[in-house]
Amino acid sequence: MEGIKICQGEKPLKGEIKISGSKNASLPIMAATVLEPAEYILHDVPVLRDIKVMQAVLKALGGRIEQKGNSMLIDTRDLNSTEIPDYLMRKMRASILFMGPLLGRFGKVKVSQPGGCSIGPRPIDWHVKGLSQMGANFKESHGFLTGWGGSLKGKEIHLDFPSVGTTENLMLGAAKAQGNTVIRNAAREPEIVDLQNFLNSMGAEIIGAGTDMIKITGKKSLSGTEHTVIPDRIEAGTFLLAGAITKGEVKLLNVIPEHLESVIAKIREAGFEIKEEGETLTILSTGITPNSLDIKTYPYPGFPTDMQPQFMALLSLARGTSVITENIFENRMKHAEELKRLGANIRVEGKTAIIQGVQRLYGAFVESPPALRAGAALVLAGLAAEGETLVADIEHIERGYDNLVGKLKKLGAEVELIKISEEDKNA
């Protein structure tokens, strides 16, 4: 297995890097290409494990893909299947986003239960309920879910929870449905807005993304298009904290600051200075010990659950006692035990973590839980820890961070990608 070795922690990161395109925007946009037989060109797509899985799904359906750097050509004119292979569904939850497009184009789909990060239940039932309201029929048998029903029909749908994936799937299904669809209590994340922009560039008629009510007027046909994916706000937030936790000075290029308002507010509350200049952000943290914080995760525009683990790493070195309450996923505190191996003082009680700041973390061998943001938190802690830290099982980190080691090296970190044997793990 692969690991990330931080050869020497406590080294301030300094310099500038460009933030990659958003993983969470790229995945639904790639699924959207199934809606209409055409060619599509996407720019600023990150090079990640999840993107490769999405490409594999498209190829399994009969699509053709060409990639050069961060640009991708997707040709969906010759799709010949509506079934997503089980082994691909198990690798990534976002595979479920093909349900809406396949029903919208072919009127049928077959999937199994999706995999992905182990951070708690993320019900597929919400997707099924919404698509069923639009006229789809579903049957579950032997672990597979089969959907059918001809053309989808526009409907007014109220989501029980502002789920990002459900909102995206319903937008995708409604883009070619008969009549008008209204999604109430919709997720408001920037990635939803990017999906709307992509679909509208295909000829769809969608308004309201970024608010809690999205209106879609179905179209009989759409067209191919060219699109540049928005910057990844979670990668940007992670690198801001990398600068903060190492007491460095890091400048980020290709950022949309308004997508990070809640994160920036908490970083400033912790005592750090952040400069905003157009599409750049710079964190100044030389000699600063963070203040303690009280953080509660909420759907966007609240504090993002995807930044909770990284802030836990930072607050391990804060003055006083911090409290983090996880309101989105019930099983997203597994990184706490691994942070404690580095010397952090953390107590988890249900969905709440109480973090008593310590003066110093110490390098150690840690294993990344099966959740990509948890792994990133361990890397951040290792960058701030005295001595050498080895983060093992980084497969999930590579699902969400494009060239993490290379970017950290550019900022001056002494890190390297290594192979870890079972003997190393048990040493």
Image (spheres, rainbow, N blue to C red):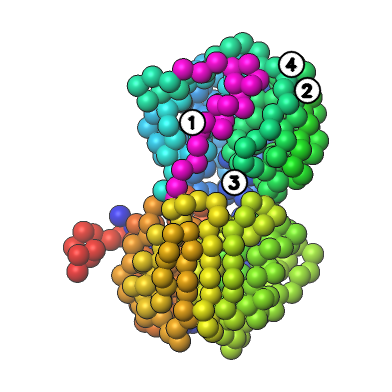
Q: Position of residue 158 (x, y in %)?
A: 68, 33
Q: Which one is closest to the eye, mark 1 or mark 4?
A: 4
Which residue is drawn at the image coordinates 73% and 20% (left, top)?
Answer: 154
> Judging from the image, what secondary structure is the residue with disc 3 in?
helix
Cα distance between the residues tagged 1 and 4: 27 Å
Separation of marks 3 and 1 at Cα, in angstroms: 16 Å
Residue at 75% across, 45% down: 210
Q: Which residues are magenta?
A: 119-139
Residue 137 magenta: yes
Amino acid at circle 3: Asn
Residue 80 lies, with reference to residue 12, above or below; the image says above
Q: Secondary structure at mark 2?
A: strand
Q: Which residue is mark 1?
A: 57
Identify the residue position indicated by label 4 in the image. Answer: 178
**Residue annotated with mark 2:** 180
Q: Is residue 47 visible?
A: yes
Quarter of the figure with the C terminus: bottom left
The tag earlier along the polypeptide, 1 or 4, is 1
In the picture, measured across the screen, residue 426 lies left or right of residue 245, that is left
Amino acid on which disc 2 is placed: Asn
Residue located at (58% from left, 48% from top): 23
- Identify residue type, mark 1: Val
Q: Name the N-terminal-most of marks 3 and 1.
A: 3
Q: Residues within 10 Å of mark 2 (few under 14, many from 20)?
A: some
